[in-house]
Image (cartoon, rainbow, N blue to C red):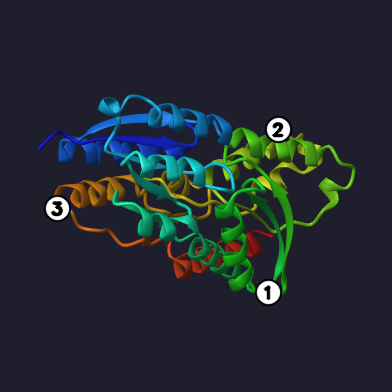
Amino acid sequence: MKKLNFVVSLTTNDNDYQMEQAASAAEAARRLGVGLELMYAESDSILQSQQLLKIIQSSPESHPAGILFEPIGGTALPQVARAAASAGIAWVVLNREVDYIAELRRSYKAPIFAVTSNHEEIGRIEGKQLTALLPNGGTVLYIQGPAESLAAKQRTAGMCETKPDNIQLKMMKGNWTEGSAHKALSAWLKLSTSLQTKVDVIAAQNDAMAVGAKKAFQELSEESGRDRWLSLPYLGCDGVSKTGQSWVKSGLLAATVVNPANTGQAIEMLAHALQTGTTPPERTFTTPRSFPSVDQLGSFHAEKMRTLSAKA
């Protein structure tokens, strides 16, 4: 059988989770003996569309057996998906639930499916973490992903589902990168009212933005309350072992939500489907978890508060 070749299109190479996605893809391709081309779209949905259309519109002899991609924009490129399916190229959507997959599966023979993180469950876990940290309620500075991101919307919805009403949110936007959160927080800190705002927890929808926020507070002067801001619990999501989980172990973050990379799993499913002629499920979810567990987080924080009270 001809060697399978896949293209994996990721959103950016400036994000620890996307780097973990790339590593997961490379490991699975090596283990399965399939060819792999990794592409990055620089957080630009138009560029991502152009990159993929260039591949689809190339000569059939150079076509990959499948394209796996993590969408940037809100539409998940339905016209590009149809063009790929029409050309006989398998199409796998990562980390997004999209409506067009069911229709394309009815119309074309190439494998078409999604492997996605359960973003609402990620948000629910973060909401439970906030509840553990703030049993009596409080205010959370909450840094979301970009407005057009369905993952960001789902994480927010899940978080709001599990946090109690006595936990208030102050929202701001980032773009999944450390630099974007640093920029957003630095701008907020220039407002005359920001330093007087009572905040009990800093929570972000990924680890990179949580760290970017903390770096913005590190740049404050002592007179501006730097130590107070830095002493707050910082929460992130994605929990990559070398970054998010490591940052929790070192104390840089209080907790994260481990969101397993899914490119490797998607490549395995696609290779199996093409080699056996079977049809994968339309949608497969990965399972997130709190790190540390929600119970441990609550215990750690309660002990920290008791220690601080004793010192006072």
Nearest the camera: 302 or 137? 137
Relative side of 220 to 237, left or right: right
Residue 270 spot, x, y in % from top left: 26, 48
Please tell me which residue is depicted at 44% across the width and 32% down the height of the picture.
52
Mark 1, residue position = 136
Q: Please tell me whether mark 2 sits on a helix, a strand or a loop.
A: loop
Please tell me which residue is depicted at 82% across the width and 53% down the height of the picture.
197
Quarter of the figure with residue 89: top left
View extreme (right): residue:
192
Spatial CA distance of label 2 from label 1 is 30 Å
Within 10 angstroms of label 1, few (less than 14), some, or many (20 or more) residues?
few
Residue 67 spot, x, y in % from top left: 35, 39
Nearest the camera: 73 or 278? 278
The mark that comes first in sequence, 2 or 3, is 2
Mark 2, residue position = 219
Q: Please tell me whether mark 1 sits on a helix, a strand or a loop.
A: loop
Please tell me which residue is depicted at 78% across the width and 37% down the height of the picture.
187
